[in-house]
Amino acid sequence: MLPNVTITPAAAKFINRIVRFSGMGAGAGLRLAVKPGGCSGYSSEFSAEAAPQADEQLLEVGGVRLFLAAESRLLLNGLIMDFTETATESGLSFTDPNKEACACSSAATSPKPGVAHIEISSIGRGRPAAPVLSS
């Protein structure tokens, strides 16, 4: 089953630029691996890839091609994917509109409840060797 994911125009533009600048051609997309982690909800890693792997499914939303493994498909269901940029950081963010803020100490430093950020510096070409962001 493919998830119901909302991708904002800003996120679509960011993702499509990553894929276009990878030089991998028309069938390329973004491999996105999402895992549960931290009280804010998710840890993520992504990379531009030429095609999905055998255990991944292709999800096309608003002109964006995402390659998703089963666990990522489950965790992304119902999320809003956006691109955020501030004076000090920028990257993809995943918001669960149905999730409440947690009561742990890291909630005070989290910009919004239910949001995980992926920094631009974590973008790689090919499969990342290690997780690039935890939140």
Image (cartoon, rainbow, N blue to C red):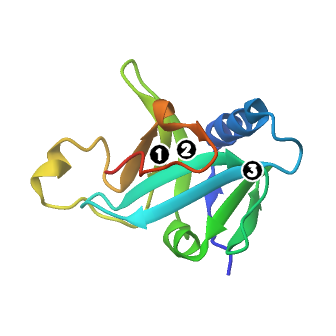
Q: Residue furthest right?
A: 26
Compare marks 3 and 2 and give the one earlier in the sequence. Answer: 3
Task: Tell me the amino acid under the disc marked 3.
Answer: Gly
Which residue position holds label 2? Answer: 82
Q: Helix, strand or loop at disc 2?
A: strand
Image quarter of residue 80: bottom right
Residue 98 lies left or right of residue 5; in this view the side is left
Which residue position holds label 1? Answer: 93
Q: Where does the image place residue 114, in percent across and percent down from the top left?
A: 35, 56
Q: Marks 3 and 1: which is nearer the front?
A: 3
- Foreground of the two, 49 or 61: 49
Tell me the number on the disc at residue 85: none
Tell me how far mark 3 sits from mark 2, CA to CA: 17 Å
Task: Tell me the amino acid under the disc marked 1.
Answer: Ser
- Foreground of the two, 119 or 96: 119
Which residue position holds label 3? Answer: 29
